[in-house]
Amino acid sequence: MIFLLSPAKSLDYETPVPPDLPSHKPLFMRPAGQLIEILKAKTAAQISSLMDLSDKLAALNVARYQAWRPTATAKNAKQAILAFDGDVYDGLNAKNLSAEQLAWADGSICILSGLYGALRPLDLLQPYRLEMGTALPNANGKNLYEFWGDTVSNHINKLQKADKEPVVINLASQEYSKVVRKKVLKARVIECIFEEHKNGVYKVISFMAKRARGRMARFAIEQQIDESEKLKDFKADGYAFAKAASSGDRWVFRRKLAS
């Protein structure tokens, strides 16, 4: 079973990495390098317009593109699961996972990325900003979905080649999960939805849903879940599986906010 996660815009390269934590290079460094070359040719003003960034953020990322190297090392990169820093990764709280738990995550979690396509949690990540929805013209088409094509879907198929009944648990946003082409994917895909009860109705609240996705990923890591049905036992932060609101492969988890 493979769990899909989105990356994060915010990055943490200040917190030290645990000593002797394993790492490896991302699988798709060559195509990532092709995208970097496209980005390197752009000015800060062009990056600002392309990604709707402030001048300060645009300048920061222009510097990142220039500093990016075809070889990732402990000096210029950090394990992805520890480098990403946002709502999802607050919920995941990878800093407090054991080496054994991180090793399990490395074989079960796929972090989708505009620059890298697909990352394992212990892949060495160099600082960057490139959201999957960016309309960046490239040799394969007009955006990153066309650039990556079937690459990510085929990668997941390869990971689950030995599984008799492959399952993908989608904890990624729609923007990122679209890069996984279901027509190519051989696995069953289960969508996990997280809703809050507020003002008399249940609805998705973005930042809470992001954190919940991270919490479910952590739950899977801690329990080393290898059967999808076991995910229905998820109860972190007050969530519970809502059978009546769920249907087929759309699984809804709900909680009531304190009034």
Image (tube, rainbow, N blue to C red):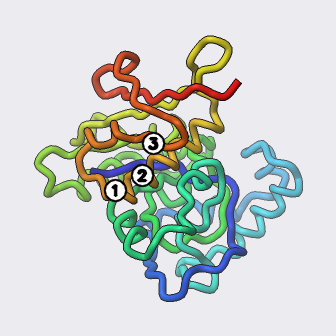
Q: Do the residues bearing badges 2 and 1 touch, measured as CB atoms within 8 Å?
A: yes
**In this picture, is 233 found above or below 2?**
above
* Sequence order check, earlier mark of 3 and 2: 3
Q: Mark 1 points at which residue?
A: 223
Q: Name the residue under label 3.
A: 171
State the image quarter where residue 240 is shown: top left
Q: Position of residue 172 (x, y in %)?
A: 48, 42
* Sequence order check, earlier mark of 3 and 1: 3
**In this picture, is 21 found above or below 249?**
below
- Amino acid on which disc 1 is placed: Gln
Q: Give me the C-alpha separation between circle 3 and circle 1.
A: 17 Å
Q: Give me the C-alpha separation between circle 2 and circle 1.
A: 6 Å
State the image quarter where residue 188 is shown: top left
Q: Name the residue under label 2.
A: 219
Disc 3 residue crowd, few under 14, some 14–19, many 20+, Cα 10 Å: many
Q: Where is residue 201 in the image (x, y as percent from the top left)?
A: 59, 13
Q: Give me the C-alpha separation between circle 3 and circle 2.
A: 12 Å
